[in-house]
Amino acid sequence: MNDRGYYGRFGGAYIPEILYATIEELTAVFEACRNDPAFWEEYKNIMSTYSCRPTPLTFAENLTAHFGGARIYIKREDLNHTGAHKANNVMGQGLLVKRMGKTRVIAETGAGQHGVATATMAARFGFDCTIYMGEVDVVRQRPNVFWMERLGAEVIPVRVGTRILKDAINEAFRDWVSNMDDTHYVLGTACGPHPFPEMVTYFQSIIGEEIKMQAMAAEGKLPNRIYACVGGGSNAMGAFHAFLDNPVDLIGVEAGGRGLESGRHASRLASKDGNIGVAQGYKTFFLQNSDGQMKETHSVAAGLDYVGVSPILSDLKERGRVRFEAATDKEVIDAMSLTIRKEGVIPALESAHAFVQAFKDAPALPKDDIIVINQSGRGDKDIFTIADAFDDPSWKAFIKTKAEEYNA
């Protein structure tokens, strides 16, 4: 990264002038904290005493035997507090908010895990909290909305645009511009204007640092491959960052939706549909038409249903350091079902995308190879969507009733 927040030709800070001083303040505080060893120790302490770190690296013995190839390990971010990797980022940003002396936090959320994590952090530190969430996601992630509200957050459904993650981000930025004196925007992924991609990666890098130590303890060597799903890119950068200078293959898996040829997907890097553009404060690959208008996206996983991707990942793709694939909705449901039955582990729909590609690759790999799948979150938040996918009639009726009640 250069001093203007660019990774190769991606990144930057394309922001309105009114936000300039706020971004400069955030950048200065982040740099001061990053250069202070005591801050990282404070961060690690709160993550170990409040957020259950380090999370386990679980040997998937039954899946390994099933595929007959590489030894499969699962990094259990689902056991992190609030059920996903999201707590890593928000607790770190919460410490920054305390140092800046601000009293209110806002956030966007798609799958709801970042919203729950932000509401949890706000409760822990005593901040006021507002969460923006697309109306479509409010319905399909209702359990997380319930917990956000119980934690004291105000959840605002976004009823403009496609009513999903992209639109929630837009609304959060509008709020921030109007309330920046006392408010910090806890952006949930490694996207947006500098310093957010770098800052989110910094806090999420604890995942990869743990994988490195845990793999050495379990196998006496580093993994051969690491797999992670890719929406905005925070869990992927968290898993990959510690290995960028090591001879480890890194594989990011995007949302293939109903197939890359269908146009109903959210794959910016593995498909031919991603084009370089500028939106929401940064330059990266977006799903956009020839006029620069953002296309509609689709994924069974709300957290991957986004038009953009981390500028860091765009640069890593151009440099050939990370390989990108896409998994369809059907493949995701099948991989989730197999994982549940074989290991008694329930990955989030987002995480299950990484399982898909790992399962495709594992049988052809040597038996002494080690692969790690980053299970970024747990699947209980997806119960309505999964029940619908499994065609469970009683749950489908329940979902229909609740959706009708909400729309009324």
Image: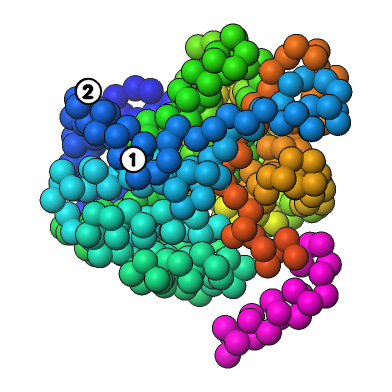
Query: Image check: 322 left or right of 32?
Result: right
Q: Is residue 281 visible?
A: no
Mark 1: which secondary structure? helix
| Residue 276 placement (x, y as % from top left) | 55, 38
Quadrant location of the C terminus in the rendered image: bottom right
Q: Magenta residues?
A: 388-408
| Residue 183 placement (x, y as % from top left) | 23, 58
Residue placed most toward the observer, 384 or 17: 384
| Residue 118 placement (x, y as % from top left) | 37, 55
Is residue 397 on the magenta stretch? Answer: yes
Quarter of the rendering containing residue 56: top right
- The answer to whether residue 54 is above or below residue 316 is below
Colouring style: rainbow
Q: Residue at x 57, y 37 (%)?
A: 76
- The answer to whether residue 266 is above or below residue 68 is below
Amino acid under disc 1: Thr
Residue that badge 2 annotates: 37
Q: Are marks 1 and 2 in contact (CB under 8 Å)?
A: no
Residue placed most toward the observer, 296 or 276: 296
- The answer to whether residue 48 is above or below residue 255 is above
Residue placed most toward the observer, 223 or 24: 223
**Is the residue marked by circle 1 packed among few (<14), some (14-19), or many (20+) residues within 10 Å?**
few
Q: Earlier in the sequence, mark 1 or mark 2?
A: 2
Quarter of the rendering containing residue 35: top left
Specify the principal SS of the magenta part.
Answer: helix
Quadrant location of the N terminus in the rendered image: top left
Quarter of the rendering containing residue 3: top left
Residue that badge 1 annotates: 49
